[in-house]
Amino acid sequence: MQAQRSFKTSGGFTLIEVMVALVIASMALVAVMASISQMIDAGTAMRDRTYAAWIAHNKITEMRLANIEPEVDDTSGQVEFADLDWNWTATVSETGIEFLYRVDVAVTFAGSDDIIRTVTGFIGEPTVIGESNRIWSNTGQPNESSR
Protein backbone atom coordinates (compact mmCIF):
# COMPACT_ATOMS: atom_id res chain seq x y z
CA MET A 1 0.00 0.00 0.00
CA GLN A 2 1.25 3.32 -1.01
CA ALA A 3 1.13 6.23 1.42
CA GLN A 4 -0.69 9.23 0.16
CA ARG A 5 1.05 12.49 0.46
CA SER A 6 -0.90 15.49 1.60
CA PHE A 7 0.17 18.81 0.21
CA LYS A 8 -0.41 21.86 2.27
CA THR A 9 -1.46 24.92 0.41
CA SER A 10 0.72 27.98 0.74
CA GLY A 11 -0.15 30.48 3.46
CA GLY A 12 -0.59 33.47 1.05
CA PHE A 13 -3.67 35.59 0.39
CA THR A 14 -6.15 34.91 -2.33
CA LEU A 15 -6.99 37.52 -4.94
CA ILE A 16 -10.39 38.16 -3.34
CA GLU A 17 -8.84 38.79 0.07
CA VAL A 18 -6.41 41.31 -1.44
CA MET A 19 -9.21 43.09 -3.30
CA VAL A 20 -11.33 43.35 -0.12
CA ALA A 21 -8.35 44.78 1.77
CA LEU A 22 -7.75 47.35 -0.98
CA VAL A 23 -11.41 48.41 -0.93
CA ILE A 24 -11.31 48.87 2.85
CA ALA A 25 -8.04 50.83 2.65
CA SER A 26 -9.37 53.08 -0.12
CA MET A 27 -12.56 53.83 1.85
CA ALA A 28 -10.44 54.78 4.86
CA LEU A 29 -8.29 57.07 2.71
CA VAL A 30 -11.38 58.76 1.25
CA ALA A 31 -12.65 59.40 4.79
CA VAL A 32 -9.29 60.86 5.82
CA MET A 33 -9.18 63.11 2.73
CA ALA A 34 -12.74 64.34 3.39
CA SER A 35 -11.81 65.16 6.98
CA ILE A 36 -8.69 67.05 5.87
CA SER A 37 -10.73 68.97 3.30
CA GLN A 38 -13.27 69.98 5.96
CA MET A 39 -10.47 71.16 8.26
CA ILE A 40 -8.95 73.27 5.47
CA ASP A 41 -12.37 74.80 4.67
CA ALA A 42 -12.99 75.53 8.36
CA GLY A 43 -9.56 77.15 8.70
CA THR A 44 -10.16 79.33 5.64
CA ALA A 45 -13.60 80.37 6.87
CA MET A 46 -12.18 81.21 10.30
CA ARG A 47 -9.42 83.29 8.71
CA ASP A 48 -11.98 85.18 6.58
CA ARG A 49 -14.23 85.86 9.59
CA THR A 50 -11.25 87.11 11.58
CA TYR A 51 -10.15 89.46 8.77
CA ALA A 52 -13.72 90.73 8.38
CA ALA A 53 -13.95 91.41 12.13
CA TRP A 54 -10.67 93.35 12.01
CA ILE A 55 -11.93 95.43 9.09
CA ALA A 56 -15.18 96.21 10.92
CA HIS A 57 -13.36 97.13 14.14
CA ASN A 58 -10.99 99.34 12.16
CA LYS A 59 -13.92 101.18 10.58
CA ILE A 60 -15.60 101.77 13.96
CA THR A 61 -12.29 103.00 15.38
CA GLU A 62 -11.84 105.39 12.43
CA MET A 63 -15.30 106.79 13.08
CA ARG A 64 -14.50 107.29 16.78
CA LEU A 65 -11.16 108.92 16.02
CA ALA A 66 -12.79 111.34 13.58
CA ASN A 67 -14.23 112.90 16.77
CA ILE A 68 -17.37 114.15 15.03
CA GLU A 69 -20.99 113.34 15.66
CA PRO A 70 -21.92 110.68 13.08
CA GLU A 71 -24.95 111.12 10.84
CA VAL A 72 -27.75 108.57 11.16
CA ASP A 73 -27.27 106.97 7.76
CA ASP A 74 -25.71 104.08 5.84
CA THR A 75 -22.24 104.46 4.38
CA SER A 76 -20.17 101.94 2.50
CA GLY A 77 -16.77 101.53 1.00
CA GLN A 78 -14.14 99.14 -0.22
CA VAL A 79 -10.80 98.22 1.29
CA GLU A 80 -7.94 95.91 0.35
CA PHE A 81 -6.84 93.78 3.27
CA ALA A 82 -4.59 90.70 3.25
CA ASP A 83 -4.38 90.82 -0.57
CA LEU A 84 -8.18 90.52 -0.82
CA ASP A 85 -10.83 93.09 -1.75
CA TRP A 86 -13.54 93.63 0.86
CA ASN A 87 -16.71 95.74 1.01
CA TRP A 88 -18.03 97.23 4.24
CA THR A 89 -21.32 98.89 5.08
CA ALA A 90 -21.69 100.99 8.23
CA THR A 91 -25.20 101.65 9.54
CA VAL A 92 -25.42 104.40 12.16
CA SER A 93 -28.60 104.50 14.25
CA GLU A 94 -29.79 106.32 17.35
CA THR A 95 -29.86 104.49 20.67
CA GLY A 96 -32.43 106.58 22.51
CA ILE A 97 -29.67 108.12 24.61
CA GLU A 98 -28.64 111.61 23.61
CA PHE A 99 -25.28 111.75 21.81
CA LEU A 100 -24.85 107.96 21.81
CA TYR A 101 -25.02 106.19 18.46
CA ARG A 102 -24.98 102.55 17.48
CA VAL A 103 -22.79 101.56 14.54
CA ASP A 104 -23.24 98.19 12.80
CA VAL A 105 -20.51 97.40 10.29
CA ALA A 106 -21.14 94.48 7.91
CA VAL A 107 -18.23 93.12 5.87
CA THR A 108 -18.41 91.07 2.65
CA PHE A 109 -16.04 90.00 -0.08
CA ALA A 110 -16.01 92.42 -3.01
CA GLY A 111 -18.63 91.32 -5.53
CA SER A 112 -20.53 89.17 -3.03
CA ASP A 113 -23.71 89.82 -1.05
CA ASP A 114 -22.96 87.21 1.63
CA ILE A 115 -22.12 88.99 4.89
CA ILE A 116 -19.08 87.39 6.50
CA ARG A 117 -19.12 89.30 9.77
CA THR A 118 -21.11 92.10 11.40
CA VAL A 119 -19.61 94.04 14.30
CA THR A 120 -21.53 96.47 16.51
CA GLY A 121 -19.95 99.43 18.27
CA PHE A 122 -21.05 102.63 19.94
CA ILE A 123 -19.88 106.18 19.39
CA GLY A 124 -20.45 108.87 21.96
CA GLU A 125 -20.45 112.63 21.96
CA PRO A 126 -17.30 114.21 20.50
CA THR A 127 -14.97 115.51 23.20
CA VAL A 128 -11.77 117.46 23.45
CA ILE A 129 -9.01 115.10 22.36
CA GLY A 130 -7.32 113.58 25.42
CA GLU A 131 -9.84 115.04 27.87
CA SER A 132 -11.04 111.65 29.11
CA ASN A 133 -7.49 110.70 30.06
CA ARG A 134 -6.90 113.84 32.16
CA ILE A 135 -9.67 113.18 34.66
CA TRP A 136 -8.02 110.01 35.94
CA SER A 137 -5.08 110.04 38.30
CA ASN A 138 -2.25 107.51 38.31
CA THR A 139 -4.15 105.38 40.84
CA GLY A 140 -7.08 104.77 38.49
CA GLN A 141 -9.44 106.88 40.59
CA PRO A 142 -10.96 110.15 39.35
CA ASN A 143 -9.10 113.27 40.46
CA GLU A 144 -10.90 115.33 43.10
CA SER A 145 -10.37 118.44 40.97
CA SER A 146 -12.25 116.87 38.05
CA ARG A 147 -15.43 116.23 40.06
Image: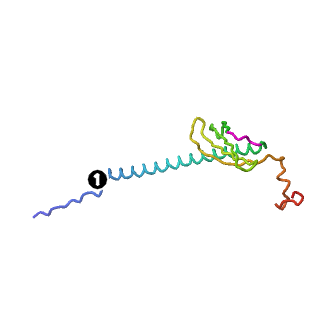
| Residue 19 position (above or below residue 3) | above
Q: Most prominent secondary structure in the magenta stretch?
A: loop
Image quarter of the N terminus: bottom left
The residue at 79%/46% (across/down) is 126
Instruction: Residue 28: give x, y in percent of width and height.
Output: 41, 52
The residue at 84%/59% (across/down) is 142
Disc tally is 1
Rate crowding at label 1 as few (under 14), some (14 to 19) or many (20 or more) other CA atoms within 10 Å: few
Instruction: Residue 88: give x, y in percent of width and height.
Output: 65, 40
Residue 119 lies within the magenta run: no
Query: Hey, which residue is sitting farthest right in the picture?
Result: 145
Residue 71 lies within the magenta run: yes
The residue at 73%/50% (across/down) is 97
Region of the chain picked out in magenta, as a range: 69-73
Image quarter of the C terminus: bottom right
Query: Which residue is under mark 1?
Result: 14
Q: Please, what is the three-letter code of the amino acid marked with disc 1?
A: Thr
Foreground residue, 62 or 21? 62
